[in-house]
């Protein structure tokens, strides 16, 4: 393996706290926050879903997405922030954090974001059915997948500290 820093996926249902965690972790560690929404916009690789209730949601061409980020992943040190995880090749991933949030709190966060009722319900179902946790556990080795709760600022701090410590251990274990 040539990368000197690990690649970490921060995933979960929209609204659970992925971006908040990724930004804080990037600030504290110097790793790069790879916001997949930005990549999709920058390279124009999302197509409108044609759903009149949800005109802003994009369907992403995953092959093209991987082409855009593969070099960054090979280099390492990426914090990958996205609401899906099983498309990233396991050989390039070192840790998968599935961020979770209690239902009522998530509902309030998504409502505040202005989500319509249908989109809101779909995302609530996604969290209740633990879709991202299952996806992560199916795609990656069990010991690589951790679940992190994000319901208070203290939890953000302790989660980020835990990942920071994990990064230090990863570097030690890999002689970096
Ligand atoms: P995501 O990137 O998963 O869509 P986000 O990081 O944008 O989520 O967070 C959604 C909102 O919830 C945002 O207003 C910040 C807030 N939030 C997230 N995690 C939190 C936490 N642990 N404590 C307090 N607020 C939190």
Image: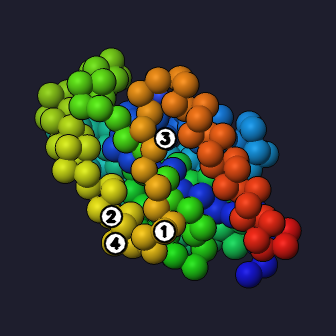
Real-space CA distance between mark 2 and mark 1, rounded to the nearest whole angstrom: 14 Å
Q: Secondary structure at mark 4?
A: helix
Q: Is mark 1 within 8 Å of ligand 1?
A: no
Residue on which the image places disc 3: 18
The mark found on residue 135 in the picture is 2
The mark found on residue 51 in the picture is none
Q: Position of residue 69 (x, y in %)?
A: 61, 65
Real-space CA distance between mark 4 and mark 2, rounded to the nearest whole angstrom: 5 Å
**Tag 3 near tag 1, CB within 8 Å:** no
Real-space CA distance between mark 3 and mark 4, rounded to the nearest whole angstrom: 20 Å
Crowding near the residue tagged with mark 2, few <14, some 14–19, many ≥20 C-alpha atoms within 10 Å: some
Front position among marks 3 and 1: 1
Examine the image and state in which quarter residue 21 appears.
top right
Q: Is mark 3 within 8 Å of ligand 1?
A: yes
Q: Residue furthest right?
A: 176
Badge count: 4
Residue on which the image places disc 4: 138
Q: Residue at x 42, y 70 (%)?
A: 142
Q: Secondary structure at mark 2?
A: helix
Of callouts 2 and 1, which one flags the residue occurring earlier in the amino acid sequence? 2
Of callouts 1 and 4, which one flags the residue occurring earlier in the amino acid sequence? 4
Of callouts 3 and 1, which one flags the residue occurring earlier in the amino acid sequence? 3
Real-space CA distance between mark 3 and mark 2, rounded to the nearest whole angstrom: 16 Å
Front position among marks 3 and 4: 4
Q: Position of residue 94 (x, y in %)?
A: 60, 67
Examine the image and state in which quarter residue 154 appears.
top right
Of callouts 3 and 4, which one flags the residue occurring earlier in the amino acid sequence? 3
Real-space CA distance between mark 1 and mark 4, rounded to the nearest whole angstrom: 12 Å
The mark found on residue 143 in the picture is 1
Q: Residue at x 38, y 64 (%)?
A: 136
């Amino acid at each position: 393996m040539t990368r000197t820093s690990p690649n970490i996926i921060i995933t979960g249902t929209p609204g659970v706290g992925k971006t908040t965690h990724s930004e804080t972790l990037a600030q504290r560690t110097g790793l790069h926050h790879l916001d997949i929404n930005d990549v999709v916009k920058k390279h124009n690789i999302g197509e409108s879903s044609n759903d009149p209730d949800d005109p802003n949601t994009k369907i992403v061409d995953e092959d093209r997405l991987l082409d855009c980020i593969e070099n960054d992943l090979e280099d390492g040190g990426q914090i990958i922030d996205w609401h899906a995880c099983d498309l990233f090749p396991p050989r390039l991933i070192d840790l998968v954090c599935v961020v979770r949030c209690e239902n009522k709190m998530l509902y309030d966060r998504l409502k505040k974001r202005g989500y319509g009722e249908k989109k809101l319900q779909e995302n609530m179902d996604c969290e209740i059915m633990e879709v991202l946790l299952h996806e992560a556990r199916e795609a990656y080795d069990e010991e690589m997948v951790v679940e992190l709760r994000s319901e208070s600022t203290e939890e953000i701090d302790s989660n980020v500290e835990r990942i920071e410590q994990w990064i230090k251990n990863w570097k030690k274990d890999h002689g970096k």
